[in-house]
């Protein structure tokens, strides 16, 4: 997607879908065997609480692993203005009071205009790790959620975030 598309008043779902890495790229970045990718023209629960009137369009890529325990979800949403995109990112950011010894911040310096992320033991199965990244490039906000038993998910999440940003710019 060109910077013009990212800054346009309305980006099409097809243009946003171009920001979703293909199955092989996502699998390689994460170091996880992913077997299937599905693209839908909506947004996942990662955008719960968002002002949908401020979002022109959104897509979600669902990446399934060898088992139902392993997956990646990548949402890409085009907001109508930068202030609303920033406000959503601020509302999604975990508060300092939500920190715990099990939570590890992901270093996303230099990726996008704004970004934050964390990994932590999965709440349903502590053998697994859940990683969450939110990032903004102009009017585009993306949310990445990964669940895996692979060590180093934080490094893979950084690589995946960079792939998404490179596709947007």
Image (spheres, grey):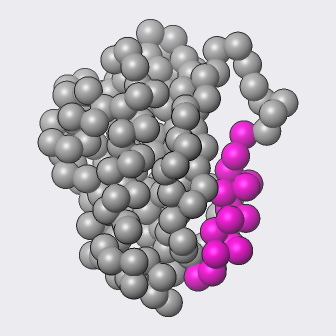
Work out which residue is located at the far front of the displayed protein and give it.
Answer: 110
The residue furthest right is: 97
What main secondary structure does the magenta stretch of the protein show? helix
Residue 1, by quadrant, is: bottom left
In the picture provided, is 128 more to the left or to the right than 110?
left
Give the percent coordinates (x, y) of residue 96. Answer: 81, 33
Residue 109 located within the stretch drawn in magenta: no
* In the image, residue 92 lies in the stretch drawn in magenta: yes
Camera sees residue 126: yes
Q: Which residue lies furthest to the top in this view?
A: 127
Can you say whether 130 is above or below 7 in the image?
Answer: above
Does 11 appear above or below 109? Answer: below
- The residue positioned 38% from the left and 15% from the top of the image is 151
The image quadrant that residue 53 belongs to is bottom right
Q: In this view, does 115 lie to the left or right of 142?
A: right
The residues colored magenta run 80-94
Q: Is residue 121 above or below residue 45?
A: above
The image shows residue 121 at horizontal and vertical percentages of 54, 17
Residue 107 position within the rendered picture, expressed as x and y whole percent measured from the top left:
55, 34
Residue drawn at x 47%, y 20% is: 129
């Amino acid at each position: 997607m060109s910077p013009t598309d990212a800054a346009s008043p309305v980006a099409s779902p097809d243009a946003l879908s171009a920001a979703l890495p293909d199955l092989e790229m996502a699998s390689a970045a994460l170091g996880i065997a992913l077997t299937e990718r599905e693209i839908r023209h909506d947004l996942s629960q990662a955008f719960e609480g968002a002002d949908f009137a401020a979002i022109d369009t959104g897509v979600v890529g669902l990446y399934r692993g060898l088992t139902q325990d392993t997956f990646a979800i990548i949402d890409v949403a085009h907001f109508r203005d930068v202030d609303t995109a920033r406000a959503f990112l601020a509302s999604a950011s975990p508060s300092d009071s939500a920190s715990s010894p099990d939570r590890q911040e992901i270093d996303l310096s230099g990726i996008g205009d704004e970004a934050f992320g964390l990994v932590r033991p999965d709440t349903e199965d502590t053998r697994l790790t859940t990683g969450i990244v939110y990032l903004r490039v102009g009017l585009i906000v993306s949310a990445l959620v990964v669940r895996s038993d692979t060590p180093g998910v934080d490094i893979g999440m950084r690589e995946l975030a960079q792939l998404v940003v490179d596709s947007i710019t």
